Amino acid sequence: QSVLTQPPSASGTPGQRVTISCSGRSSNIGSHTVNWYQQLPGTAPKLLIYSTYQRPSGVPDRFSGSKSGTSASLAITGLQSEDEALYFCATRDDSLTGPVFGTGTKVTV
Amino acid sequence: QVQLQQWGEGQLRPSETLSLTCAVYGGFFTGYQWSWVRQTPDKGMEWIGEISHEGNTNYNPFLKSRLTMSVDPSKNQFSLQLTSVTAADTAVYYCARGHMGDFWSQGTRVTVSS
């Protein structure tokens, strides 16, 4: 039921840059801000980016968000082993009453 | 730091009712929407619904006929009831603060099986 499409996996070596895409439509990403979440195995999702670009307190500036048209992206620079996790995007959708989520991308370091 | 802690039955038989409760520690309870989201390997994250501290609800239309949410502001708690569960309701259920969730619970794995 995921409305937003993400690549199932991404990988990199320590220190590299990894970018994860989140593709949607004009009714969701095209019209609203995007959140990104990090979910380590067996743990609760953690808000990584909100309002497309903003980082909550405590999130390293290695993580950054961007958006263009109906797609959003999460970039991780200076990749570290502890970044190995599932990452998913979320946003509002004009045609639905609740938020919509991405399919999730598993990042391997 | 805001923390959400949930509890409820994790093993159900088809046609039974799923009941989960989420308690909020730290931060304000009033002024926020409180949400339920579930996650499966096949479908990913699915929004279930949300309730305000005043008890105003907004449900996923696909689940609305089986869904009831309630809130107890005096205890900083909110609850979910999903009736007539089937195997399709097997998932990890999370409670979260806000419409999309800025703080999340650890989740409860719910399995529906005969």
Image: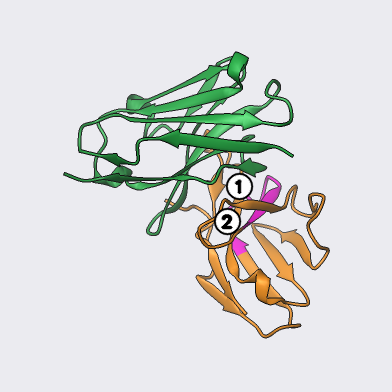
Chain colours: A orange, B green
Q: Position of residue B49 (x, y in %)?
A: 49, 32
Q: Position of residue B74 (x, y in %)?
A: 61, 14
Question: Which residue type carries mark 1?
Answer: Asn
Q: Position of residue A109 (x, y in %)?
A: 62, 80
Q: At x 61% / y 22%, what residue is drawn?
A: B76
> The C terminus of chain B is located in which quarter?
top left
Res A108 quadrant in image: bottom right
Q: Is the C-beta separation of discs 1 and 2 under 8 Å?
A: yes
Label 1, label 2: how far apart the Cα atoms are: 6 Å
Q: At x 60% / y 47%, what residue is drawn?
A: A28
Question: Which residue type carries mark 2?
Answer: Gly
A36 in magenta: yes
- Outermost residue toward the left in this view: B114
Tell me the chain of label 2.
A
Badge 2 marks a residue whose secondary structure is loop
Whether residue B48 is visible to the viewer of this picture, yes or no, is yes
Q: In the picture provided, is B96 more to the left or to the right than B84?
A: right
Q: Residues in magenta?
A: A22-38
- Outermost residue toward the bottom in this view: A13
Q: Nearer the viewer, residue A73 or B4?
A: B4
Which residue does the numbered mark 1 point to in the structure image? A28
On screen, residue A66 above or below B31:
below
Q: How many marks?
A: 2
Q: Nearer the viewer, residue A93 or B6?
A: B6
Q: In the picture provided, is B62 more to the left or to the right than B56?
A: left
> The N terminus of chain B is located in which quarter?
top right
Tell me the chain of label 1.
A
Q: Nearer the viewer, residue A83 or A20?
A: A83
Which residue does the numbered mark 2 point to in the structure image? A24
